[in-house]
Image: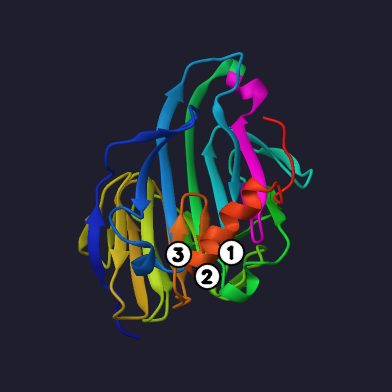
Amino acid sequence: MSTKTIAGISRPGTPHFVGDGFRVHNFIPGTSTMQEMDPFIMLDYNSRYSFAPSEIPRGVGVHPHKGFETVTIAYRGKVEHADSTGSGGVINEGDVQWMTAAKGILHKEFHEKEWSKKGGDFQMVQLWVNLPARYKKSDPKYQNLRNTDMQKVALPGNGGEIEIIAGEYNGHKGSASTFSPINVLNAKLKKGAEATFNSPAHYTTAILLVEGSAKVNGTDIVPQDHFAMFNRDGETFTIEAVEDAVVLVLSGEPLQEPIAAHGPFVMNTRQELVEAFDEFNQGKFGYLED
């Protein structure tokens, strides 16, 4: 198989706050467009940031989503959430919450109450995955992926492990169900360890250096908190940890459908966006107390 090469490496831009609890760098859209990164249509990265203790949890109040999925990956800190379907819970360190907004949902997320009282380092990724048009009007649902239940593949020589959030790695499958073929992996590599990844040439492929730094294909150095996008020119690439590293690896088959996006709604046409706002204003996403 031929080598998939890097198209570009992006440094984190100026951070901004989402609500008062998430200090994020925006990589998608930002360094690339939704169309270029299809089916990954947003990536907000809360790089490691220390929050002071607070009796009142910081976060984001009630807001709607429709037409896609949100994937919240907790590296440090804890998040408490609730929605208009009556679901809720806590995303602990190492866990992932996979929310399918689909036909519409109201949602809120805050630092977990007890964690907020103590404060500390907070580090998260929120990824938006677009839904194929035929699934955008399906019912909302959750997948709460506990770290203890995740499929993990050990690398040779105590070199670390690959956590499979979704998709597969070397024949091992993750527990998350998806609406289109995608891989979401955490590569946790010890210094000097190397892992090989396969991704079809036409797939959208990218990595985020969550911790440490790494060398791709033996040449390109990707520093901590940087985002690297790949060309659509090969099927395999290697990641070698220059120091102990955590690398979020994304690859997915493009949906190749029209994207009409505004704020918290991602549909296929402008008319569908108008309908989404009408449904929200008419209270069709349910009720959730702020």
- Kindly indicate the quadrant of the structure image that contains residue 68: bottom right
Q: Which of the two labelled residues, at mark 1 and mark 2, occupies the earlier sequence position? A: 1
Q: Which residue is at the far left?
A: 219
Q: Say whether residue 223 is magenta.
A: no
Residues drawn in magenta: 96-116
Looking at the picture, which amino acid does disc 1 mark?
Ala
Structural distance between the alpha carbons of marks 3 and 2 = 21 Å
Asked if residue 234 lies left or right of residue 189, the reply is left
Q: Which residue is mark 3?
A: 260
Residue 134, percent from left and from top:
62, 76
Give the alpha-carbon distance from disc 1 to disc 2, as whole Å. Answer: 7 Å
Q: Earlier in the sequence, mark 3 or mark 1?
A: 1
Q: Residues within 10 Å of mark 2 (few under 14, many from 20)?
A: many
- Contact between labelled residues 2 and 1, with CB atoms less than 8 Å apart: yes
Q: Amino acid at mark 2?
A: Ile
- Side of 198 relative to 8 (left or right): right
Residue 159, quarter of the rendered image = bottom left
- Residue at 70% over, 50% down: 285
Residue 219 higher or lower than 5, as above or below: above
User: Where residue 231 sits: x, y (%)?
Assistant: 28, 73
Mark 3, secondary structure of its residue = strand
Pointer 1 residue: 166
Residue 140: image location, x then y, percent: 71, 57
Q: Nearer the viewer, residue 127 or 154?
A: 127
Local crowd size for mark 3, using a 10 Å CA cut-off: few (<14), some (14–19), many (≥20): some
Q: Residue furthest bottom?
A: 1
**Quarter placement of the C terminus:** top right
- At 23% from the left and 67% from the top, the residue drawn is 7
Residue linked to disc 2: 182
Relative to the observer, which residue lies in front, 179 or 194? 179
